[in-house]
Amino acid sequence: MKKGKKRSSIMLSTILVTSGLYFSPVNFGTQVEAAAQTSVNPSIKAFDQKVIARVSAERIYKDIHFLSETIGPRVTGTEGEELAAKFIKERLLSLGYKVETQEFSVPDKMIGHLHTSDHNEVLVNIPSGSEATTIEGVTAKLFNAGLGKVTDFTAEAAGKIALISRGELTFKEKVDNAVAAGAIAVLIYDNINQPGPLNPSIGGNVNVPVGGITKVSGEALLQDVVAPGKTMTLNVTRIANAKSQNIIATRAPKQGKNHDIVHVSAHIDSVPFAAGANDNASGTAVALELANVLKSYPIEKELRFAFVGAEEIGLVGSEYYVSQLSKDEVGRSIANFNMDMVGTSWENATAIYMNTLDGKANIVTDTARATAARIGTPSELVLYQRGSSDHVSFHDAGIPAVNFIRREPGTANLEPYYHTPLDKIEHISLERLKEAGDLVGASLYSLIRK
Ligand code: BES
Ligand code: ZN
């Protein structure tokens, strides 16, 4: 499949060129001046300064680099996620925190490999519910099954791998029609251009292996593999008994006990094929920096950092974390600051959204607004009703919670790199990391300090 290979390398270089290198100089002076101009009690401003004078965008950036470039994708239950958890744990221990690892099981995961008989690899996503193959995989000719309607199949489909375009029917209907026609595996290709392979969720279990591929791959295979009658091999492995983990760091006031608890959370894991620089090495690295900045200031509330795994498969890590809190601890929990996607350089994402599950203000949004006014946070803060991140688990336990996330004001759009292989360090802004670190850091400190 020479043509297909050429195309994918052209696509890769286009991605690299269009993504460019975004590196903006940081003007820390502006924020310091803005804070100095407000008419707030000078001692409160001095507390803010203790935090924001120490928050280093460069340090945060370096950690994002390590997580997203050195480690790379940190898919739930894989070695990448575990390596990131180890890195975080070691850092927190070196900062002097009491650190705990919470391990939990995650559902089985399917890993796929797809290659042509002339040894070209094609990226493939395997939905849960697909059948696994033997180590050798299934090798067969492709059958062009159009949209996968009943009428798209002929007797020729039997014993072949059905290649089906996304559209009109559900993924499950396409697979069922292919099975009825005697196909031994199904590949579904996207009908829109997205950098990562299609993720065709098929609901329940089916008794053939199923994979999703990009539009570019599907169209290349149609030209190069279906017609000349080459074969393809699809390999599907089920990863069973996989584990994920949360890393919890705690700092309690020296005196007394039963203090109120403030939780900071960020998810460690990423989606497959994405380096997850913004989603969510950004939130992870800002939280690590705040752990550094707040490691020794006098406090009168307990500070807990929850670096959670398995967010991308349905908030599993944060649900587990919250489930392990005692009733008493839940009762003492006054706030959750969740950071997820705080560092994008996408130019339209000029607002910091404060997502709450019920769309209502709470102690976290109020604290952040007051802090932003004092320190002169340049971005607009928008209160918005949205779940989709770990604040949901805290909210469900009755803990006031907010997800801080950068979006386009008005539309609430996320960056175009979201959940794609383009979510890389090139699209991270030092300025915006500093803004998130200052805002959340000074807010936290205003709640926990003596
Ligand atoms: N980083 C996103 C956060 C997010 C928040 C995305 C709001 C979109 C809207 C998060 O990692 C994510 O991708 N969430 C999933 C849902 C989750 C429950 C699996 C999503 O929104 O698809
Ligand atoms: Zn995500």
Image (spheres, grey):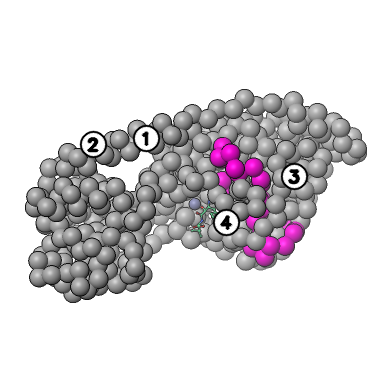
Q: Secondary structure at mark 4?
A: loop
Name the N-terminal-most of marks 4 and 3: 4
**Residue 117 seen in this snapshot:** yes
> Which residue is under mark 3?
443
Q: Nearer the viewer, residue 60 or 87?
A: 60
Q: CA distance from mark 2 to mark 4?
A: 41 Å
Q: In this rendering, which labeled residue sits more in front, label 1 or label 4?
A: 1
Neighbours of disc 1 within 10 Å: few (<14), some (14-19), many (20+): few
Instruction: Kindly tell me whether mark 1's CB lies below 8 Å from ligand 2.
Output: no
Q: Residues within 10 Å of mark 4 (few under 14, many from 20)?
A: many
Q: Residue at x 91, y 37 (%)?
A: 39
Q: Residues within 10 Å of mark 3 (few under 14, many from 20)?
A: many
Which element is circle 3 on?
helix
First-in-chain label (1 vs 4): 1
Q: CA distance from mark 1 to mark 2?
A: 12 Å
Measured as percent of width and height from the top left, residue 334 is found at: 73, 57
Point 41% across, 59% down: residue: 106
Q: Secondary structure at mark 1?
A: helix
Q: Where is mark 4, residue-wise?
A: 390
